[in-house]
Image (tube, grey):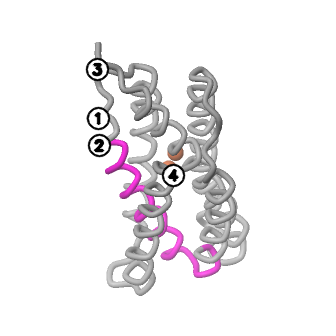
Amino acid sequence: MAVNHGLGDRIIKVNHAGEHGAISIYTGQIMMARLTAPGLVSELIEFRSHETRHRTLFGAELARRGRPRCRSYWLCGAGGFVLGAMTGLLGANAIAATTVAVEGVVLRHLESQLSALRGNDPGATSAISAIVAEERQHHDDSARRIGAGTFWPKVLTPIVSGATEAVIWLGMRL
Ligand SMILES: [Fe+2]
Ligand SMILES: [Fe+2]
């Protein structure tokens, strides 16, 4: 069987760093939401607990492969925290818009990762498959929370989507 472990290794390390970024976004948002959107805090804590499980899953797959974490790992953590804190300060609509933008990009990448790896990398495929439903839940629950015609989603969506794409692009090349 043709095995392209290079691609699977890179995908797993980028996803591992991405989950660290997601945890950090939620940590920043939870801190600020206590002031700006207290009604969202328990949901954000639940989402973060999923991301912690995802990071553990990709971390274990990375260890199984004997690969080090991505060099973008700490960048994802710091950048994620700043993004989370800033959007958290802006309140409930900005928080939801950020999640929708990030998860929209993430879901597209997960789908294309699965189609690139399916059949030649069962370890990577099963780790990725295991998280898709929760990422979709984060996306869909947050999308329902965004008020129609509100300001922050329009401003934040292109910025946050672009930043997420850039981090994934960079991580795949590091
Ligand atoms: Fe995740
Ligand atoms: Fe997520």
Q: Position of residue 108 (x, y in %)?
A: 32, 50
Front residue (pair 4, 114)? 4
Mark seen at residue 170: none
Residue wearing tag 3: 119
The first of marks 1 and 4 along the sequence is 1
Q: Position of residue 144 (x, y in %)?
A: 37, 63
Q: Nearer the viewer, mark 3 or mark 4?
A: 4
Does the beta carbon of the residue at mark 2 sit less than 8 Å from ligand 1? no
Q: Main secondary structure of the magenta part?
A: helix
Residue wearing tag 1: 116
Residue wearing tag 2: 112
Q: Is label 1 in contact with label 3 (beta carbons under 8 Å)?
A: no
Residue wearing tag 4: 171
Q: Position of residue 168 (x, y in %)?
A: 46, 54
Eyeballing the image, is 88 above or below 65? below
Q: From mark 1 to mark 4, how far is it between C-alphas?
A: 17 Å
Q: Amino acid at mark 2?
A: Ser
Answer whether residue 99 is magenta in the image: yes
